[in-house]
Structures are given as structure tokens and as C-alpha cells.
Amino acid sequence: MDIATDTSLHIVILEDSAVDAELMELELRKGNVSARYSRVESEPQFKDILNAEQVDLVLADYTLPEFDGMRALAVLRSEFPHVPFIFVSGSLGEERAIEAMKSGATDYVLKDRLQRLPSVVVRAVTEATERRERVHAEAALEEQRVLLRAIIDNLPEHIYAVDATSRLTAINQAMLSKLGYRREQVISKKLSEVFTAAHARDMELQDAMVVNSGRPLIEQEHVIEQEDGSVLWSMGSRIPLRDPQGKVVGVVCTERDISNRKELEQEILEISNREQRSMGSDMHDGLGQELTGLSLMMKGLQVQMEREHSVYLDQVVKMSELITNTISTTRLMARGLAPVNLERGGLREALRLLMLRCSSMYNMQCTLEDQQANLPDLDEGQATHLYRIAQEATTNAARHSHATAVTIELRTTARRLYLSITDNGIGLKNGLSKGTPGMGLKIMEYRARTIGGSIAFDTLQRGTRIALSCSLLLLRRRRVNSHHKAKSTTHH
């Protein structure tokens, strides 16, 4: 604000001497202070002008016949606390000056030193303007903060922020409602003090990853195992918070429950798997049995023609062999539509047969390492995803990596299943190593996400390892509507 040219500046002079008031105005003009002046000398006049017009500054004598300067200061501060008030007096001693400043006066000038008045006024008006602008800015920020809080609190997603040590710095109402806490109960607490131990550990690991790398994690699906044995699916994003210097000082996190969506996806996949199993069963029990009957008839015809030394014997033998091959192909196709069958040994048997076929088809050394005697009962649909991942990996090893050996390892712990496929091929030179994974890798990633697992593609010194990890709770035979029992993705 340039008060030298700002003629809208309004200065009220509380002075019973017109001559003294004119001297103040003259000194201010000499100091290049342009303003409009109003002189008053009584309390009613002073209150009237305060209520009628905008006042930017008050110059007041300390002692007046009908009014007291300290009383005027009190009136101004009660109504307009940010308007500068400067005493201009010839009778203001040091003690009174100190008292006036303590009472809220901006400054004071002695009448025999009016040459100081312009600089004092300029400083007072400038500071008042800056203070007013700061107050307006703070009010605007507070208004934005309240609006932002209202928006965030009314979103259905769970939103929270943590600092670099995983202590909560903000949390929205949707998440508080699910947790059953009040905001003041969780702010500044570590995640491990609010959430279940396993969930908090996963959250803190992901937050640490964002803090250390500075890279966001967008739309990450993960599974939360509840204490009652149910599971929940959640999709979340983690965005790094940076200070003005660019240093990551925290993480903003959003999570939403996608359990209903995942259940629908599982139902759709299960329908597809049932249809495939049904087609495989029809092919095996229908077409396969009819071909078997035809094969037996051809065998009988072949025996009869051998007795009669028929000239058509060679053709009949060839037809019989063709039918036998067709039966074998039909059985392979039927098994391929439903590769994992609990009655035929489940996942372990399916992987063993996969190794045998790969050895025969691709002339590779194929090994299945499975030291566990008792593999938990797995849902056929979920186990089929595991089988397809292994099938895709072995096919890639043979066709694209030119591997001569592949090993499948299957093992479980109390809570998780681990499946790895390792080959001795040329690695992922044309896929993952160039940052452009092929369709086969994308399908494996999709299947891993579908069953709530994580998959990693590692290029070894010689070959490739594909490693999958998944919760056994998700792989076991499904329980109806298990996730509806759960309370939230962030239940404590």
C-alpha cells in the first residue's frame, strides 16, 4: 500500500485545538502522506464517526476537556481492534506512554517533535494493512480448511495421513466411524496402536516404501484377514507428502472396501469354471465314451477281418489307430478344461501331470518339488488360477526363454502358500526387462491379483524365477458370504 498517493486513507484527529490539528495535517503533507482528515473533540462525535465511516488511523491528544485519550483508546479497541491509534500530546510523560502502549496504543509522538509524525503514521498504517491482509488470508485458509474437511469427511472412502514415522496426522469421519474412535483419540498415534497388528505392519511397510522411494502407490489391491477368520478386499492409494524443499515428510492414504466387487468377480469366474468343468465332463463322459465304443467296434471288426484275410484290414487298422488317438486327444482336452480336480488329486496331481506333459512336449527336464505330505483342501477355482500361472510360466520357459530345465516348487506355511517356477532360459529380455511385459505376464499378474496374491518376476544369472505368494485363507474352499461378517477394512 502506497499511502503517499492513497487519498482514500481516512485519519481521525481527536483534538480540541484546531491549530494543533492543522499542524499535524501540515506535517503529514510535508511527509508526503495523502489522506482525508476528520477532527472530533468529544466522545459522541468520536463514536459517530467510527460508526458512520471507515477509519484507517486515529491521532489523539492524551487530555481533552470533554474526553480522555485513554477512554478513546478503549472505545476504539472494543469496536475496531486493528485500527492504529497514535497519541499526539504535549503532556504525555514516560510512565503514561508506557501505560498507553500496554493498553493497546500503536505509538506516541510528542507535539514538540511533530517531524516524527509522518514516519510513525506510515509505519502504523503499513503494519495495520499487512496485519489485516494476514487476517483475511488466514480466514480464507480456515474457510478452505473447513470446506476441505467437510468434503473429506463426507466421502465414503477411508482417508488418512501419516508422518514419516507412521503416526496419524489426519483422518476422515468415515474411517473414524468404522474404527469407533474420536479424532482426538487417534491423532499422533502410531498405526500399530490403532489397527490390528498384521494390518498395521502391512500399512507401515507400504508407507515406508513411499517415504523412501518418493513414488506413489496407486490403486493397490490388498487383502485383510480379520480376527474372526473372514477376509476383506481393499483398494488403496498412497501419495507422498512433501515439504517446501521437496523432502517426503508423510503419506496421504485412501482406502475403499471392494469386497462386494471381488465377490462378484469370483462368482463370475466360478460360473466360467463350472461351465468349463461341465464341458470337460460332457466331453469325457459323452464324446469320450462314444469314441471308446466305436473303438471297441473297430477292434472287433479288425479281429474278424484278420480271420478272413480281408483286403481292407490295413484300412481298418489305420481307422482304429486314428480313433484311439482321437480318444487320447479328447481326454487331454477334457482334462485341460478342468485341470484341477479334487477327486483326481487336486493341485498337486495337476502340477505333476503338467510336468510330465512339458517333459514330453518340449523335451525339457521338468521337476516338481513338493515335500509336504498334506496340502490343505483348496477351492478348485482358486487352485485353477495357480495351475494356469504355472502352465503359462512353463510354456513361456519352453517357447520364449529356450529353457532346457524348469522346476516348480510348491510349499505352504501356517498362513500362506508359495508357488515358484524357475527355468534356466535366457531370461525376460523381450518382456519385463524392457518394461513392456507381454500378455502372458499380464495374465499371470491378473490371476495373482484375482486370488489376492502377489507375484514377482526375477531375472537370475541364468534364467527366470516367477514367485507367487498368497493367503491360504483365500485359497481354501470358500465359505458363503464370509466377508459380510467383517466390520471394515480397517477394523481395530
Image (spheres, rainbow, N blue to C red):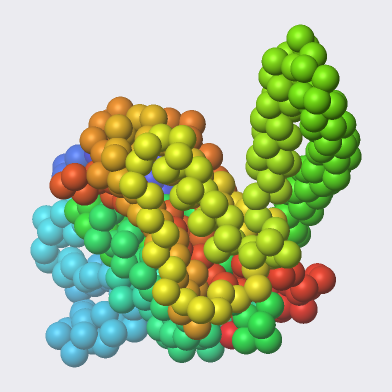
Confirm whether residue 488 shows in the render: yes
Query: Which corner quadrant of the image does residue 34 belong to?
Result: top left
Q: Position of residue 41 (x, y in %)?
A: 44, 67
311 left or right of 434?
right
Q: Is residue 55 above or below residue 78?
A: above
Question: Considering the image in quadrants, where does the N terminus appear?
Answer: top left
49 left or right of 203?
right
Q: Is residue 425 above or below residue 470?
A: above
Q: Position of residue 316 (x, y in %)?
A: 76, 19
The one of 193 and 84 positioned closer to us in this rendering? 193
Q: Position of residue 319 (x, y in %)?
A: 74, 20
The one of 371 and 324 positioned closer to us in this rendering? 324
Confirm whether residue 138 shows in the render: no
The one of 340 and 35 positioned closer to us in this rendering? 340
Question: Considering the image in quadrants, where does the C terminus appear?
Answer: bottom right
The one of 324 and 414 positioned closer to us in this rendering? 324
- Residue at far top of view: 311
Query: Which corner quadrant of the image does residue 82 belong to?
Result: bottom left
Residue located 64% across and 63% down the image: 346
Residue located 84% across and 32% down the image: 300
Residue located 58% across and 60% down the image: 349
Residue located 28% across and 53% down the image: 214
How many marks the image carries: the answer is 0
Q: Position of residue 171 (x, y in %)?
A: 53, 71
Query: Which corner quadrant of the image does residue 428 belong to?
Result: top left
Q: Is residue 243 above or below residue 428?
A: below
62 left or right of 110?
right
